[in-house]
Image: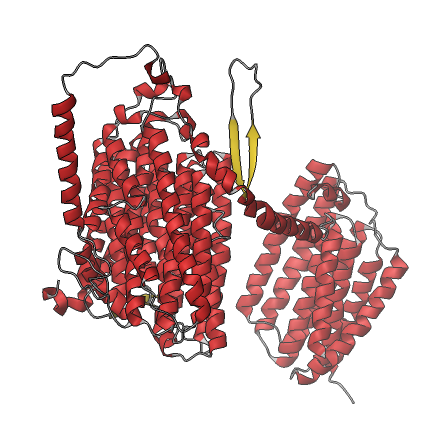
C-alpha cells in the first residue's frame, strides 16, 4: 500500500510526536523538558499545516498558526522565565525511577493502539492510523503528571496532554470547529497564566515548588 | 359566595396574583433595607393584606368548581400547572386567616430588630408565605416540589434568623436535613405515581391506574415524606429544636400553618391522586398518629422552656390529625361513607383550630419573651399583673387547646371522639377491638394536653414573679395585641359557630369522601349523624356559663362583701409565701416524668443540702434521639471517615484516580 507523500510526512511527524513524549518521560532536567515541549508543539504545528495543505481544510491553517505561536514560542518562553525567576532546582525529581516509567509507557502505547483500532476504522480521514499515537500521547502525558513532583512539570504534562488531544481531534475529524479551538487555545493561555501565579504563591507558602509539601493541606 | 360562582376561574387568577404579590413584597423588602418604617409600616402590613385576600379567596372558592391554569413559567414542555379545588381552597383559607393575624403581630414584634436583618427576614417571610400558598395550588409534581423547596429553604433561613448563636445554627441544620430527607421521599413518591410515562401533572396521576402494591409503595413514601415535614414520630426531632430557635411569629407560622401543608399533601396524595386506598394504610396512620400524639404530649408535660413545650404540643396535635386521617381511611375503605365524612370533618376542623390557637400561643410567648427576655418558665411567673392583655388573650388560646367548651378545640376533639364512639362495627373484627383503645388514647392525649396547658399558663402568668426583673415587664405593643385579638377571635368564633363552619367545609369533605357530614341538628345545635346520640349547642352553653358566672359573682359580692374577715395567726399554714415556694415547671411535670420514665432519659442536678443558694436543674431527653438518631449519625460519620481516606493531599494520587478512571472507561468503551 503506497501512501501519498504528504501523508508519509504526517505519519513521520506523528512518530516523532510519540518519540518526544517518551523523551519527555525520561528527561531529567526541567529546562530540557521545556525544550522538548516546544519541539512537540513544533511537530504538531507542522503536521497540522501539512494536513491543512493536503486536504484543503483551511481552518486548520489557523490552528497550526495558533499552535506555533502559543506552544512553540509563547509558553516555552514563559516557562524559561519562570524557571529562571524562581530558581527552580533544575533536576526533575521523579516518584518512580525512569526505566519503570518507560516500561509502563510502553504498556500504555500498546493499550492505546489496541483501543484505537476499532475507532480508526470508523473515522473517514486520511490519517486515521495516527489516532492510536494521539491517544498514546495523552496517556503518556498523564503518566508524566503522575510520576513527577514539581508543580512546573505538572503544568507541562498538562499542556502535553492538550497537545495529544489536539492531535487526536485533527486525526479523527480534521480538528474541531475553529471557534472551539480558539476557545481551547484561550483557555490554555489563561490556565498557564493562572498556574504561573500559583507557582509564585506555592513557592511563597512552602519555600519550594515540590508538591509533597501540599500534603499538609489535607484535613486532620 | 354562591353568587360569585360564575367567576370560578378568576379565583385561581386572584390566588396566583396573591402569590406573586407576596414574592414581590419579599423582594421589595430587600430594597427597603435602610428604612425600618417602610418595612414595618408598609411591606409587612401589605403582606398581611394579601393574606386576608387569600383567606377571602379560599372562602369564596370553597363551593366553586375546580379551576385549572397552566403558567408560562417552568421548564420547556413542563409548565407550572395550578388548580384550585375545595381542598386547596380550604387550606388557603387556613393559611390566609391565620397568617393575617401573625403578620399583624409581626409588625409590632419585629420593631426591635435592626433594619438590615429585618429586610432579610421580610424577604424570607414573604417567600415562605408564597411557597406555602403555591404548595396548595400546585397541580403538577414539578411545581409542587419547587414550592415545597421554597417553603423549606425560606423557613430554614427564618429559623436561623439569629444565626450567631451556635445552637440555633444546629437546630436549623437538623431541620434542613430532615426536611430534605422527606423531600427526597416525596420526589420518589411522585416518581412512582407518574409510572414512567414522564408526565408529572396531577391530572395524569389521577387517571393512572395503579396496582395495590405500587399504590402502597407510593403511600408509604408519601407518609414518610409528609411525616418528616409534619413531625410524625420518629421524624419529629427537628420540631422541638427548630420552633424555639425561630422568632415567635415564625414559630407561629411554622407550627400553625406549615405543618398543615404536610396534612394537605397527605390528603391530596391519598384521596385525590391515588385511585385505590387500602384499609391497612389507615391502620398504620392511626397507630403512628396515636403514638405521636401521646409521645408529644408526654414530652410537652416535662418541658420547662415555654416555646419547646409548645413545639411538643404541636407534635401532639399533628398526631391527632394523622390519627383522624387514619380513621377516615379505615372508614372510607370499609364503605362507611358517613363516618368517614364525620372523621374528615373533625380532622379539617382540628387543622384550622390548631392553626389559630397554636399561632396565638406562640405569639403570646413572643410577647412574654420580648417583655422579659426569658424563655425558661422557671424564671417567669405572675405576669398577668404586668401584661394583662397578653395574659387574657393567651388564656383564650390555652382554653381552646385544652379542649374546653365553648372554644374551638372542644368541637374538633368532640367530633373526633364521636367518630370513634359511633363505630357501629367494621367488617374487620381486629379493628373493632382496637378502635375503643384508640379512642381511649385520644382521650388520654386530650386530657394530658389540658394538663400541659394548665402548667403553661399557671407557671408563666399566675402566682408570684420568680425574678425581680419581671416587675418591669411591659405590655405587648398595639399591633401585637391586635394580632393576638384576631387569632383569639378566630378561636372563639370557630368555637361558637360550628354548624356554619361545618357547612363551609362540607365541599372539601364531599370532594374527598363522596359525601358530607349529616348534621341532624339545626343552626344552633350540632348533632353529627343522629340527634338522639349526641348534640352540642355552643351558644347555649356559653349563655349558661356566663349566666352561672354572673350569678355566682353577684352572690359572692352580696353575701361575702363587707363581712369582717379574720386572719388567723397561722394563716392556714401560709404565714408568708414567696416565689420559691410556688410549684415550678419541673415540679408540675414530675408525676408525668415518673409515670412515663421509660420514654425519656432524665438528667438531674440536685443541690447539696447545705447549699445557701440551692439550684436545681432537671432535663428530660428524648430517648429516640439516643436510640435512633445517634447510631445513624455515627454510621454517617464512620462512612465519611472511610471516604476521607481517599484524600491524601498528594496531587499524584489524585491524578492516579483520574488516570485509572480514564483507562477503565476507555476499556469499557472499547469492549
Q: Residue at x 65, y 82 (%)?
A: A125
Furthest toward the bottom, the residue is A1
Residue B207 percent across, percent down from the top left: 36, 79
Left/right placement of residue B406 relative to residue B613 reads left
Residue at position x 65%, y 63% in the image: A67
Q: How is the image coloured?
A: secondary structure
Residue B286 can be seen in this image:
yes
Residue B198 in the figure: left or right of residue B19: right
Q: Would you identify the image quadrant in which residue B521 lies?
A: bottom left
Vertical side of B242 occupied by A110: above or below: below
Q: Nearer the viewer, residue A106 or B359?
A: B359
Q: Position of residue B589 (x, y in %)?
A: 45, 35
How many circles with numbers are drawn on the protein?
0
Say above or below: A141 vs B622: below
Q: Residue at x 28, y 41 (%)?
A: B399
Answer above or below: position of B349 versus B461: below
The C terminus of chain B appears in which quarter of the rendering? bottom right
Tell me where residue B626 sits by quadrant.
top right
Which residue sits furthest top? Answer: B569
Direction right: furthest residue: A99
Viewer-nearest residue: B633 or B310: B310
Residue B282 visible somewhere in the drawing: no
In the picture, measured across the screen, residue B146 lies left or right of residue A61, that is left
Q: In this orientation, which residue lies closer to the viewer: B124 or B30? A: B124
Give coordinates of residue B181: x percent, y percent. Answer: 51, 56
* Horizontal relation, residue A55 to residue B448: left or right: right
Residue drawn at point x = 23 percent, y = 40 percent: B483
**Residue A63 placed where, x, y %?**
61, 67
B312 and B452: which is toward the camera: B452
* Placement of the N terminus of chain B among the 4 image quadrants: bottom left
Amino acid at each position: 500500500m503506497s501512501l501519498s507523500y504528504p501523508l508519509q510526512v504526517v505519519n513521520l511527524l506523528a512518530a516523532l510526536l510519540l518519540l518526544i513524549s517518551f523523551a519527555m518521560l525520561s528527561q531529567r532536567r526541567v529546562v530540557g523538558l521545556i525544550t522538548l515541549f516546544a519541539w512537540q508543539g513544533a511537530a504538531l504545528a507542522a503536521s497540522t499545516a501539512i494536513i491543512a495543505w493536503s486536504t484543503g481544510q483551511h481552518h486548520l491553517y489557523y490552528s497550526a498558526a495558533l499552535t506555533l505561536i502559543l506552544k512553540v514560542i509563547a509558553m516555552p518562553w514563559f516557562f524559561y522565565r519562570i524557571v529562571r525567576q524562581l530558581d527552580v532546582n533544575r533536576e526533575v525529581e521523579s516518584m518512580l525511577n525512569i526505566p519503570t516509567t518507560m516500561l509502563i509507557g510502553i504498556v500504555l502505547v500498546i493499550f492505546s493502539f489496541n483501543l484505537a483500532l476499532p475507532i480508526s476504522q470508523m473515522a473517514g480521514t486520511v490519517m486515521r492510523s495516527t489516532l492510536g499515537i494521539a491517544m498514546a500521547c495523552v496517556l503518556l502525558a498523564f503518566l508524566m503528571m503522575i510520576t513527577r513532583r514539581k508543580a512546573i512539570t505538572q503544568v507541562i504534562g498538562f499542556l502535553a496532554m492538550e497537545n495529544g488531544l489536539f492531535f487526536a481531534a485533527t486525526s479523527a475529524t480534521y480538528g474541531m470547529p475553529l471557534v472551539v479551538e480558539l476557545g481551547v487555545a484561550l483557555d490554555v493561555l489563561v490556565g498557564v497564566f493562572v498556574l504561573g501565579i500559583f507557582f509564585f504563591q506555592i513557592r511563597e507558602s512552602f519555600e519550594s515548588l515540590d508538591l509533597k509539601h501540599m500534603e499538609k493541606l489535607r484535613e486532620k | 359566595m354562591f353568587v360569585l360562582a360564575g367567576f370560578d376561574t378568576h379565583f385561581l387568577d386572584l390566588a396566583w396574583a396573591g402569590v406573586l404579590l407576596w414574592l414581590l413584597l419579599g423582594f421589595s423588602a430587600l430594597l427597603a433595607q435602610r428604612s425600618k418604617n417602610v418595612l414595618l409600616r408598609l411591606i409587612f402590613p401589605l403582606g398581611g393584606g394579601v393574606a386576608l385576600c387569600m383567606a377571602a379567596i379560599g372562602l369564596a372558592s370553597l363551593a366553586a368548581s375546580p379551576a385549572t391554569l397552566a403558567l408560562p413559567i417552568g421548564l420547556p414542555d413542563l409548565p407550572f400547572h395550578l388548580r384550585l379545588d375545595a381542598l386547596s381552597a380550604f387550606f388557603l383559607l387556613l393559611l390566609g386567616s391565620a397568617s393575617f393575624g401573625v403578620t399583624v403581630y409581626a409588625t409590632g414584634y419585629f420593631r426591635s430588630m435592626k433594619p438590615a436583618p429585618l429586610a432579610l427576614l421580610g424577604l424570607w417571610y414573604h417567600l415562605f408565605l408564597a411557597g406555602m400558598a403555591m404548595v396548595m395550588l400546585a397541580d403538577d409534581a414539578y411545581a409542587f416540589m419547587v414550592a415545597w423547596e421554597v417553603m423549606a429553604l425560606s423557613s430554614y433561613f427564618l429559623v436561623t434568623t439569629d444565626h450567631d448563636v451556635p445552637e440555633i445554627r444546629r437546630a436549623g441544620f437538623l431541620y434542613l436535613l430532615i426536611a430534605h430527607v422527606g423531600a427526597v421521599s416525596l420526589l420518589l413518591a411522585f416518581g412512582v405515581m407518574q409510572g414512567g410515562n414522564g408526565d408529572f401533572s396531577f391530572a395524569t396521576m389521577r387517571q393512572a391506574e395503579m396496582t395495590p402494591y405500587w399504590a402502597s409503595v407510593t403511600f408509604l413514601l408519601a407518609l414518610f415524606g409528609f411525616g418528616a415535614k409534619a413531625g410524625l414520630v420518629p421524624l419529629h426531632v427537628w420540631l422541638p429544636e427548630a420552633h424555639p430557635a425561630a422568632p415567635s411569629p415564625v414559630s407561629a407560622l411554622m407550627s400553625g400553618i406549615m405543618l398543615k401543608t404536610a396534612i394537605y399533601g397527605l390528603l391530596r396524595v391519598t384521596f385525590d391522586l391515588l385511585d385505590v386506598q387500602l384499609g391497612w394504610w389507615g391502620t398504620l396512620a392511626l397507630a403512628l398518629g396515636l403514638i405521636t400524639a401521646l409521645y408529644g404530649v408526654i414530652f410537652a408535660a416535662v418541658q420547662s422552656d415555654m416555646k419547646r413545650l409548645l413545639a411538643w404540643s404541636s407534635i401532639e396535635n399533628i398526631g391527632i390529625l394523622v390519627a383522624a386521617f387514619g380513621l377516615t381511611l379505615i372508614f372510607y375503605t370499609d364503605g362507611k361513607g358517613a363516618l368517614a365524612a364525620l372523621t374528615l370533618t373533625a380532622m379539617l376542623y382540628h387543622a384550622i383550630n390548631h392553626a389559630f390557637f397554636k399561632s396565638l400561643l406562640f405569639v403570646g410567648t413572643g410577647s412574654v419573651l420580648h417583655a422579659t427576655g426569658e424563655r425558661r418558665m422557671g424564671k417567669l411567673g405572675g405576669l398577668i399583673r404586668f401584661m394583662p392583655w397578653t395574659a387574657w388573650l393567651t388564656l383564650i388560646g390555652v382554653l381552646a387547646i385544652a379542649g374546653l367548651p365553648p372554644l374551638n378545640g372542644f368541637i374538633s376533639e368532640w367530633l373526633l371522639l364521636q367518630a370513634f364512639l359511633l363505630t357501629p362495627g367494621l367488617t374487620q373484627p381486629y379493628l373493632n377491638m382496637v378502635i375503643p383503645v384508640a379512642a381511649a388514647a385520644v382521650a388520654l392525649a386530650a386530657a394530658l394536653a389540658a394538663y400541659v396547658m394548665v402548667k403553661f399558663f399557671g407557671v408563666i402568668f399566675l402566682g408570684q414573679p420568680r425574678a425581680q426583673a419581671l416587675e418591669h415587664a411591659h405590655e405587648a405593643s398595639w399591633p401585637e395585641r391586635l394580632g393576638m385579638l384576631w387569632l383569639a377571635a378566630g378561636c372563639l368564633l370557630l368555637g361558637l359557630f360550628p354548624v356554619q363552619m361545618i357547612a363551609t367545609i362540607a365541599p372539601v369533605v364531599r370532594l374527598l369522601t363522596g359525601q358530607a357530614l349529616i348534621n341532624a341538628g339545626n343552626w344552633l345545635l350540632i348533632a353529627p349523624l343522629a340527634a338522639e346520640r349526641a348534640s352540642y349547642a355552643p351558644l347555649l352553653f356559653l349563655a349558661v356559663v356566663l349566666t352561672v358566672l354572673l350569678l355566682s359573682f353577684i352572690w359572692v359580692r352580696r353575701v361575702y362583701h363587707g363581712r369582717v374577715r379574720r386572719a388567723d395567726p397561722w394563716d392556714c399554714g401560709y404565714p408568708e409565701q414567696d416565689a420559691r415556694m410556688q410549684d415550678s415547671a419541673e415540679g408540675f411535670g414530675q408525676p408525668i416524668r415518673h409515670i412515663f420514665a421509660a420514654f425519656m432519659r432524665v438528667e438531674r442536678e440536685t443541690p447539696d443540702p447545705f447549699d445557701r443558694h440551692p439550684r436545681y436543674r432537671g432535663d428530660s431527653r428524648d430517648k429516640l434521639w439516643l436510640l435512633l438518631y445517634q447510631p445513624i449519625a455515627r454510621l454517617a460519620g464512620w462512612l465519611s471517615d472511610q471516604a476521607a481516606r481517599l484524600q491524601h493531599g498528594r496531587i499524584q494520587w489524585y491524578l492516579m484516580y483520574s488516570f485509572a478512571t480514564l483507562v477503565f472507561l476507555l476499556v469499557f468503551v472499547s469492549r
